[in-house]
Image (spheres, helix red, strand yellow):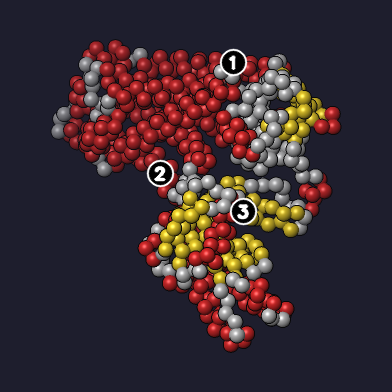
């Protein structure tokens, strides 16, 4: 098994174990938040719902196995760092869990011991244990809050990155995800504080009744022999974990120094430029470290091919492409000496030739921005006039200009009023993008609202056209939603933000289908589902889109002004 395959396995293990731990964290912290209502309510949810999921042998193996694997792989990633030049997000991903483990290990250790002694760890017992030492209560509350914050932020960054690049519906439901990201930790901390407050109030009431042992009465649920195992947990963690972290830090520093001064490979570029980098560094990272311009529109995530290079020499014995790179190579039919710079990690000296020319200084001087692009789910609308060539041949040029401007005016005003933006005019065609809202479902609704208003607007315009020119405008609208690349594109002074991608082509082809169906509107099922529009008012069909594998479910409407939103 080569190193590339091992790295993929490690990455997948971190993802799968991270998902399991994140799901546990959500259920556990939501259970904590119920303490805002009462401790008894939180215990009821814990016994009847939380235990239903997690109190069984399979769940124990998954949970503790995932925890151990995730921690080991986390420290492995630290130990194998070849440079401290990483982003702020990566620093947070490393530091937050390392700090949180100082408290989390005590929390897990104590809970595991009590479970082994068959102690039912009710919230009432937990808060009694914390309230038994008033001097440590505030410190315990602060440490718990920080632990929740650090672990949750670490998990959210990981889950956000996973969903963003793998699930197209993520952007559509972003508001809901953000609500969860904020509500869960805040609710857990408020529940923790509420539980401590409720316990304190009950203890005060019992003390007034003469029951000064109210707090201590809860300790009877713990067998005496368990204390011999519980008491050493805190000093064991506090005395040894910092030493372990220090050892990891020292090894990490030594590894970075080793990578910097030993075990390096030389990357040669056109023009006699050479740069020495540690083994395991990607070609794209080497270019950046060397200050050599190297195009990478997706930022080095393997989502495009703009960073590809031709291996001029050193091809023999080069590491094989990983599964992700192989898929791209096979799809696009690259030669064996063409590789993605963001995926290729040379283990010996190489000479490479970047195949996409970077922007020159002259182009940058005339262009307000460089190459840019990001993946985003976008609603794309195409509008086109029917038989306009025939109409323009029978009219004087200035009459054609007048008619086009009237048509542009009607469509443009409606598009902008519904939070869309005109992307470009293509003869008698219009391309519009609806991204005025952060919520994809709102953008889909806005595009459908614009479609029905455009139909009504052109219907009104035709009354004037028939009087002035004895002609009526007929049109077709195609709407689709999907992943596109949004970025600043163009040359010189003509640079605009636009979208490109297969889903843009699909929207255009849906518009063309209006000719076949003799309709005004053709829209994909994804748009209607997102906008929550009743599909019964449409005619539906599954069709094959040119250049796309599989069939696409589409809906058509003869007159778009009949659309009921």
Q: Position of residue 14 (x, y in %)?
A: 48, 27
Q: Front-most of 435 and 350?
A: 350
Residue placed under numbered mark 3 in the picture: 499
Which of the two residues, 298 or 425, is positioned nearer the viewer here? 425
**Residue 385 visible in the displayed image:** yes
Secondary element type, mark 3: strand
Residue at 69 percent of width and 37 percent of height:
307
Labels 1 and 3: the sequence-earlier one? 1
Kindly check if marks 1 and 2 are in contact, taking CB atoms under 8 A apart as contact.
no
Q: Position of residue 86 (x, y in %)?
A: 62, 31
Q: Horizontal placement of 24 versus 260: left or right?
A: left
Q: Which residue is mark 1?
A: 251
Task: Check disc 2 and report its element: helix, strand or loop.
Answer: helix
Q: Quadrant of the C terminus?
A: bottom left
Relative horizontal placement of residue 282, taking residue 520 as reference (left or right):
right
**Of discs 1 and 3, which sits in the foreground?**
3
């Amino acid at each position: 098994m080569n190193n590339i395959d091992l790295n993929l396995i490690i990455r997948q293990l971190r993802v799968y174990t991270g998902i399991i731990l994140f799901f546990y964290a959500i259920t556990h912290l939501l259970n904590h938040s119920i303490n805002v209502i009462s401790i008894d309510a939180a215990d009821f949810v814990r016994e009847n719902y939380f235990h239903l999921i997690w109190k069984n042998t399979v769940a124990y193996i998954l949970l503790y196995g995932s925890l151990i694997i995730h921690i080991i792989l986390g420290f492995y990633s630290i130990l194998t760092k070849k440079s401290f030049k990483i982003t702020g997000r990566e620093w947070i991903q490393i530091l937050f869990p390392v700090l949180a483990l100082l408290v989390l290990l005590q929390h897990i250790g104590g809970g595991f011991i009590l479970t082994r002694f068959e102690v039912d760890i009710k919230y009432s017992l937990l808060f009694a244990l914390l309230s038994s030492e008033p001097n440590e209560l505030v410190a315990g509350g602060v440490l718990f809050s920080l632990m929740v914050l650090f672990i949750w932020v670490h998990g959210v960054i990981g889950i956000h990155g996973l969903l963003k690049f793998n699930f197209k519906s993520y952007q559509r439901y972003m508001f809901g995800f953000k609500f969860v990201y904020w509500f869960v930790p805040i609710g857990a901390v408020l529940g923790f504080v509420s539980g401590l407050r409720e316990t304190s109030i009950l203890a005060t009431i019992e003390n007034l009744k003469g029951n000064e042992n109210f707090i201590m009465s809860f300790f009877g649920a713990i067998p005496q022999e368990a204390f011999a195992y519980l008491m050493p947990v805190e000093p064991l963690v506090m005395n040894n974990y910092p030493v372990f972290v220090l050892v990891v830090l020292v090894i990490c520093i030594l590894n970075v120094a080793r990578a910097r001064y030993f075990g390096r490979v030389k990357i040669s570029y056109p023009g006699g430029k050479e740069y020495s980098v540690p083994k395991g560094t990607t070609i794209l990272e080497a270019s950046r470290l060397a200050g050599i311009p190297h195009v990478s529109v997706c930022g080095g995530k393997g989502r495009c091919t703009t960073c590809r290079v031709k291996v001029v020499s050193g091809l023999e014995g080069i590491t094989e492409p990983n599964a992700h790179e192989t898929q791209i190579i096979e799809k696009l039919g690259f030669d064996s000496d063409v590789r993605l710079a963001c995926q290729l990690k040379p283990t010996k000296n190489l000479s490479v030739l970047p195949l996409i020319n970077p922007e020159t200084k002259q182009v940058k001087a005339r262009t307000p921005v460089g190459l840019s692009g990001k993946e985003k789910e976008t609603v794309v609308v195409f509008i086109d006039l029917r038989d306009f060539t025939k109409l323009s041949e029978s009219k004087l040029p200035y009459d054609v200009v007048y008619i086009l401007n009237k048509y542009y005016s009607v469509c443009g005003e409606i598009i902008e009023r519904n939070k869309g933006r005109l992307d470009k005019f293509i003869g008698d065609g219009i391309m519009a993008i609806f991204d005025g809202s952060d919520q994809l479902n709102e953008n889909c609704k806005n595009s459908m609202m614009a479609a029905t208003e455009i139909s009504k607007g052109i219907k009104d315009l035709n009354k004037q056209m028939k009087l002035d020119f004895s002609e009526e405008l007929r049109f077709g609208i195609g709407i689709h939603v999907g992943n596109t690349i949004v970025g600043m594109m163009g040359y010189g002074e003509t640079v605009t933000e636009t979208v490109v991608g297969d889903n843009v082509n699909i929207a255009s082809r849906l518009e063309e289908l209006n000719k076949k169906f003799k309709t005004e509107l053709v829209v994909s099922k994804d748009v209607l589902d997102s906008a929550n529009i009743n599909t019964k008012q449409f005619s539906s069909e599954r069709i094959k889109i040119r250049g796309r594998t599989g069939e696409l479910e589409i809906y058509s409407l003869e007159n778009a002004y009949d659309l009921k939103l």
